[in-house]
Image (cartoon, grey):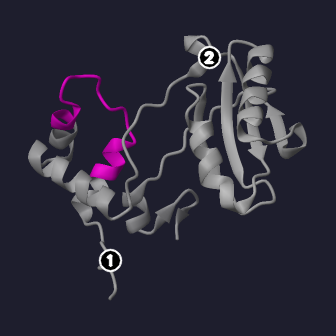
Amino acid sequence: MTKDVFFPDETDIAILDALQDEVPLVCRPWDVLAEKVGITSGEFLIRIEQLRDAGILKGVSPILESRRWGLPSATLVALKVPPGRVEEVAALVSSYTEVSHNFRRDHPFPLWFTLSGRDEEHVQALLADILERAGLSEEDALNLPTEKKIKVDVRFRFRARMQGEGAGGPA
């Protein structure tokens, strides 16, 4: 049995584009975004759920600037974790509020995550705690501290893609 493939229509594409712009900080932001797209807020919410169920939209969440709320030091960490323990160690890593996200890669170090702290010593103490609790050694970790932060604003313009345009113009 094959799963039906979901093909977003023009309205779905407009929703995806709108969600990548600034979401207003109001009690019902979907009302504002729905109006921008030209549909009711009820339809907007139903379509978001359909996009999520289809695996197109993972979620809607803020992008927080950790430096602004007291965590100016950061590092990218890659862990060498045995294949049978990746999910277990990922759950442990995710339990730390100083970890913004983690992800799996097809790599000798399969688990990668970002870790922020008050200062370099705090970041190192957090990493040491993670390693100890996971039963891993320092050699099992690639610690890649942030030297210079460069923020890249990545947005996918779906309407342009549907019309045959990309970053370099028409396809």
49, above or below 93, in the image: below
Q: Residue at x 63, y 32 (%)?
A: 151
Q: Residue at x 72, y 24 (%)?
A: 126
The span picked out in magenta is 15-32
> Is residue 28 inside the magenta stretch?
yes
Within-10-Å neighbours for mark 1: few <14, some 14–19, many 20+: few
Within-10-Å neighbours for mark 2: few <14, some 14–19, many 20+: few
Expressed as whole percent of the image width and height from the top left, the position of residue 73 reads 72, 19
Q: Secondary structure at mark 1?
A: loop
Expressed as whole percent of the image width and height from the top left, the position of residue 148 reads 78, 26
Q: Which residue is mark 2?
A: 67
Q: Is residue 5 left or right of residue 47?
A: right
26, above or below 79, in the image: above
Q: Which residue is mark 1?
A: 5
Figure quadrant of residue 66: top right
Question: Front-most of 26 and 72?
Answer: 72
Identify the amino acid type marked 1.
Val
Of callouts 1 and 2, the N-terminal one: 1
Q: Is residue 168 left or right of residue 162?
A: right
Expressed as whole percent of the image width and height from the top left, the position of residue 9 reads 25, 66
Question: Front-most of 64 and 114?
Answer: 114
Identify the amino acid type marked 2.
Arg
In this orientation, does residue 101 appear? no
6, above or below 18, in the image: below
Specify the label residue 101 is tagged with: none
